[in-house]
Image (cartoon, rainbow, N blue to C red):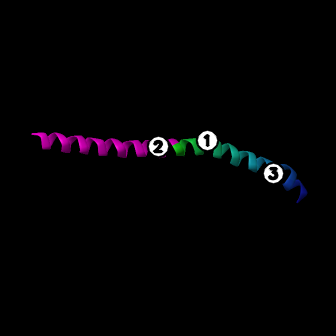
Amino acid sequence: MTDLLTRDLPLALTVLAGAALIVGPVAALSVMFWHWQEELKRSVRLRQARTTQIR
């Protein structure tokens, strides 16, 4: 049991921390990209609505 705590637990925590350092920023960028796409779609719709009102 002590061997598990001294050897495997730090290794598992290191692997989990490494995964979090990789997955965290990628997830944040994905959310930012998704919001950016939604904003672009809204601005295209708004621009289209404004140009149709002028005509």
Q: Is residue 44 magenta?
A: yes
Mark 1: which secondary structure? helix
Q: Is residue 40 magenta?
A: yes
Badge 2 density bin: few <14, some 14–19, many ≥20, Cα 10 Å = few
Q: Which residue is mark 2?
A: 32
In which quadrant will I find the N terminus?
Answer: bottom right
Mark 3: which secondary structure? helix
In which quadrant will I find the C terminus?
Answer: top left
**Most common SS among magenta residues:** helix
Q: Is residue 16 left or right of residue 25?
A: right
Q: Residue 5: where, in percent of width, then height?
A: 85, 55
Q: Are marks 3 and 1 in contact (CB under 8 Å)?
A: no
Q: Quadrant of residue 23?
A: top right
Q: Which residue is mark 1?
A: 22
> Earlier along the polypeptide chain: callout 3 or callout 2?
3
What span is colored magenta in the figure?
Answer: 29-55
Q: How far apart are the alpha carbons under marks 2 and 1?
A: 16 Å
Question: The disc labelled 3 sits on which kind of residue?
Answer: Asp
Q: Is residue 54 left or right of residue 27?
A: left
Question: The disc labelled 1 sits on which kind of residue?
Answer: Ile
Q: Is residue 48 left or right of residue 35?
A: left
Q: Which residue is mark 3?
A: 8
> Earlier along the polypeptide chain: callout 2 or callout 1?
1
Q: Kindly report which numbered mark, 3 or 1, lies closer to the viewer in this rendering.
A: 1
Mark 2: which secondary structure? helix
Q: Residue 33: where, in percent of width, then height?
A: 44, 42
Q: Farthest residue to the left: give it.
A: 55
Q: Which one is in front, 53 or 13?
A: 53
Q: Residue at x 80, y 52 (%)?
A: 9
